[in-house]
Amino acid sequence: MSTTYVVMLALLTGTHAATWGAYKDSPFEGFKPVSFARTIVLAVLAAAVLATTTDLETSMAPLVFVGVIYAVERLATELWKSFIREDDQDAYAIPMRIAVLGRTVDGRGPRYLMGVVIFVAVVVMAFVADALQPDNGGSLLLLVLVGGIGGWLTAVGGAWKDAPVEGFSGWKFLRSPVVATAWTIMLLPFTQDWVSLTFAAAGLSVLSIETYKTFFTGGRPPGKFDGKPMRPGVDVQRHRCQVLHSGVYMCLALVAGMAALFALVDALSASVVSLVVLTVVSATISVRVARSPSGPAPAARRKVVTDAIA
């Protein structure tokens, strides 16, 4: 991939994440240009780091590259919100700061230490996985199981944050592993590298689930703002985010469709089938997002008050 292509993929990836985030959150906290731009910049920086410090840019298929960028950007954003950012947690129905059994960790020292431990654990697991991987990647079943690990980790993180307030939901817990495993199957024709597969499947599962939660759930408010008052005057910004989000999926459909046509010249393969499926699904999502109506005002919900850990 050329540098221009890498930057374009990063911009599309960052725009996808920025648009669903702004669309969901702006009715409650207003449209934040800095947060919108931060997401895109993080995606570009993630792509730049991967392209300059590893051989992933040359050895990785574009779809896998997008998934890895998405995972890295989301991981960086969650680390920032959970361990570093200083803001009023009363603004949220579900605290965004790291919590233990529903009690937020407000002391900076313990919070920073927990963030470092989690970051180091992710890096160590990646190195261990790379060292343990067989030369051929392993059996099909093993690859599918490994690719779904990112979904399981995402589910654990979500349950850790949400369950003390909302209660544990088996459906929500299993959703990320199931979607990540489905993406793993789609990605197998393009990579059998355990680390790339796990990160890409996790990133693409977040991409898919957030689009579903944002545009296909009837306007249900984000859990972190459930019961919070809505702010007027953000309809224009939300509509622009909706159009941009739809456009990202249409770009993905066009790129995947062209790649499928070029690959089909040689032979019908598993990668061609994956690209065709991706083309159809992306085009369908693009149309559905564009036609998605604005949701109703959120209903109030009793909030579980959490204590803080100093």
Image (cartoon, grey):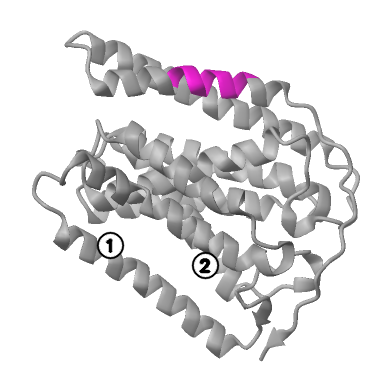
Q: Is residue 186 left or right of residue 13?
A: left
**Image quadrant in which the C terminus is located:** bottom right
- On the image, the x and y values in percent for residue 307 come to 74, 83
Q: Is residue 99 above or below residue 29?
A: below
Q: What element carries label 2?
A: helix
- On the image, the x and y values in percent for residue 181 come to 39, 42
- On the image, the x and y values in percent for residue 120 come to 35, 74
Identify the residue at horizontal 32%, vertical 16% (top origin). Answer: 260
Q: Is the magenta stretch mostly helix, strand or loop?
A: helix
Check if residue 44 falls in the magenta segment: no
Q: Is residue 202 above or below residue 235?
A: below
Q: Mark 1 points at which residue?
A: 126
Task: Write the start and end of the magenta stretch as one range.
Answer: 279-287
Q: Name the residue under label 2.
A: 79
Please name the amino acid that badge 2 sits on: Leu
Identify the residue at horizontal 17%, vertical 43% (top origin). Answer: 139
